[in-house]
Amino acid sequence: MSFSNKIIWITGASSGIGKSLAIELSNQGAKIILSSRNIVALEDVKNRCKTASSIKIVPLDLENYSSLASKVKEAIACFGRIDILVNNGGVSQRSLVKNTSIFVDKRIMDINYLGTVALTKGLLPHFIRNKNGQFVVTTSIVGKIGTPLRSSYAASKHALHGFFDSLRAEHFKDNISVTLVCPGFVTTHVSKNALTADGSPQGKMDVATENGIQPERFAKLMAKAIRKKKEEVYIGGAKEKLGVYVKRFFPKLLSVMIRKLSVT
C-alpha cells in the first residue's frame, strides 16, 4: 500500500508521536486531517508538513465524546472520504493506586478509551459503506503489561486491545483492518502531561522517557506498520519488547521483574 493520496485522520496530532507521524505521512504523499484541542499547535504542524494545502484541521476534545459524531461529519467533508483513522490522542498517568482519586481514573478512561471508541463508532459506518478502511490505534506496551504508577493508564490501553480485537473480527468481511501500535518509551511530553493522583500534570519528564526513541524515528516505524497493515506491533527498546514475550511465556517471572520496578 502506498500513502499517495490516502486520506488519513490523526488525533493527538499537535505534538509527540501524532505530530511526527503527520509530517512523515505527508512526506509520503498522504492528505492529512489533524485533530487535537490545541489549534495553534495544529497550525504549526500543518506548516511543517510537505504540502500545507493537503492538510486540514478539525479541532476536537476526546474527553467530550458526546460531540464527536459531528466531528466525524466535519472530517469527512474535508476531502470527501477518510481511508485511515489514527486514534493517537490520549493522556498518561504517574500515581499509585492507593493515592489516585477515582475522578482521575474516570478522566483517563473517558479520554483514552471512551473518546477513542466514540470516534471510531462515528466513523465506522463510513468505512462499512466504502467497504474499505483502517483503524490505527496508539496503545502502549502497558496495554499488554501493567506496571507501577500507571494503573488506570494501563487499564485504558488494555481496554482498547479488547475493543479493537473484537471490531477487527466483526468487520473483516467489510475489508476493515485494525493496526494496534504499542510504543515503549518515546521522547515526547507524555510524562510531563501525565496525570498525578489529584489530576494535576506531573510537569517533568521521566528519565526513561527522555532516553526513549526519538518521535521522528518512531513515526517512520509506525508508518511502515500501517502500510503493511500489521495487526499488532511493538515499537520500543529491547527491554520493553522483551517484557511482552516474557509475559506471554513466563508470566510469573515477569511478575517478579515488575515488582522490582521503582514506584517513587
Image (cartoon, rainbow, N blue to C red):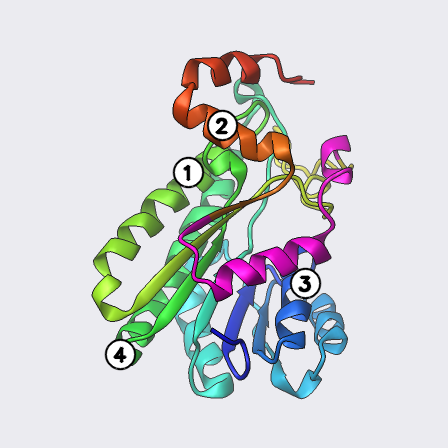
Instruction: Say if mark 4 contacts mark 1, CB within 8 Å.
Output: no
Residue at 38 percent of width and 44 percent of height: 161
Kind of residue sitting beneath label 4: Arg
Q: Which mark is residue 19?
A: 3
Residue 221: x percent and y percent?
Answer: 60, 56
Instruction: Say if mark 1 contacts mark 2, CB within 8 Å.
Output: yes
Q: Residues under labels 1 and 3: Cα distance? A: 24 Å
The overriding secondary structure of the stretch rendered in magenta is helix
Which one is nearer the viewer's eye here, 139 or 234?
234
The residue at which mark 2 appears reads as: 146
The residue at which mark 1 appears reads as: 158
Q: Earlier in the sequence, mark 2 or mark 4?
A: 4
- Say what secondary structure mark 4 lies in: helix
The residue at which mark 4 appears reads as: 129
- Circle 1 packing at 10 Å, graded few (<14), some (14-19), many (20+), is many
Quadrant where the image shows the C terminus: top right
**The residue stretch that appears in magenta:** 206-232
